[in-house]
Image (cartoon, helix red, strand yellow):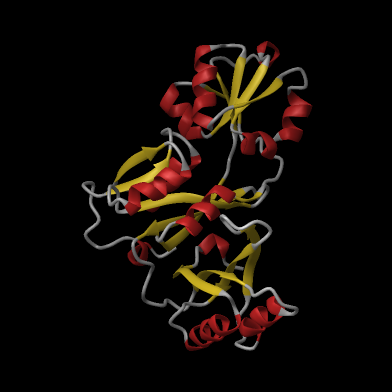
Amino acid sequence: MNRDLLVPKTMSSSQRVSYMGPAGTFSHVAARAAFPDATHVEAPTIASVIDEVAAKNAEFGVVPIENSTEGSVTPTLDALLEGALQIRGELVIEVALCLLARHGDRSRFRRVASHPQPLAQCRHWLARELPEAEPWPTASTVVAAREALADDSVAAVASRLAAELHGLTIVAENIQDRPENATRFVVVADTDAELPTGNDKTSVVFTTRHERGALRRALEAFDDGGINLTRIESRPALGRRWEYVFFTELEGHRRDPNVEKALERLAFVCGSVRVLGSYPRAVADSH
């Protein structure tokens, strides 16, 4: 990720970056990584992060969009579809899950608390190492850390940052089942990264007409332009039963001639097309 393209030269601690809290979540880790010099402001949900930016209470928002183990973060996709913000950048955060508690005696743990996604990301480790402890879903990893702080029979699956903020012992590190486990975050703002870098991605959402071959014709617009799609996923269209929208990510910037031509053709063959933003591709996401 090129921070010069992601962050304005005037970025300072007086500018605000919203993230899904509480403090100590992986969203907080991502916000600090993307904007180390800004004021980081927590919001209760992904939708509220985007609402804060839309209302100009924050200049930027940092939200998770995809996990390498569990797949898409659907609240982010839905919030982007409902709103008018642009994706300005992306970054990939390695998800190093830790087991946290007030002490290190594993035999005393009766419950293991965390957000459902981290619990799923280390379910095999938990089944092997703590077979008697009951998984306990919570609203966030930080809520889980607070439960562990309040009750010494509870362990939490959370980040190292959560351990530091709450004064908890790190009982075990890197307990995720897949060592490559990572979450991709996007930075949302009023505008995307307008200047191409030569290593960009563009996010697009489109709908197809209700006729045979409609999706094929849409995909041909990219194929004929020599454009590689890195992701495509359907989501139910809001307010329309049994209709769908397609979230697509492609290599290239919307100002690249071949991408611009493909988007023009896509608009001709599709029911609707909306560019969610062009932005520098995260270094950790390059292949």
Relative vertical location of residue 155 with respect to residue 8 in this rendering, above or below: above
Whether residue 29 appears in this view of the structure is no
Q: Residue at x 50, y 67 (%)?
A: 281
Q: Is residue 262 left or right of residue 85?
A: right
* Position of residue 127 measured from the top left corner of the image (x, y, whole percent): 77, 28
Instruction: Measuring from the top left, give residue 61's x and y in whole percent.
Output: 38, 51
| Left or right relative to 47: residue 176 | right
Q: What residue is at 49 percent from the left and 29 percent from the top?
A: 142
Residue at coordinates 72% horizontally, 19% vertically from top-left? 133
**Compared to 135, does 262 lie above or below?**
below
Picture layout, residue 24 above or below residue 149: below
Foreground of the two, 174 or 270: 270
Task: Please report the residue visible at 68 percent of the width from the left and 14 percent of the height from the top.
Answer: 110
Q: Position of residue 216 (x, y in %)?
A: 71, 79
Instruction: Tell me if residue 200 can be seen.
Output: yes
Q: Give the left or right position of residue 184, taking residue 164 as reference.
A: right
Q: Using the image, determine if residue 81 lies above or below residue 132.
A: below
Q: How many marks?
A: 0
Q: Quadrant of the C terminus?
A: bottom right
Percent from the top left, x then y, of residue 165? Answer: 41, 27
Q: Nearer the viewer, residue 68 or 266?
A: 266
Q: Quadrant of residue 207?
A: bottom right
Quadrant of the rendering where the N terminus is positioned = bottom left
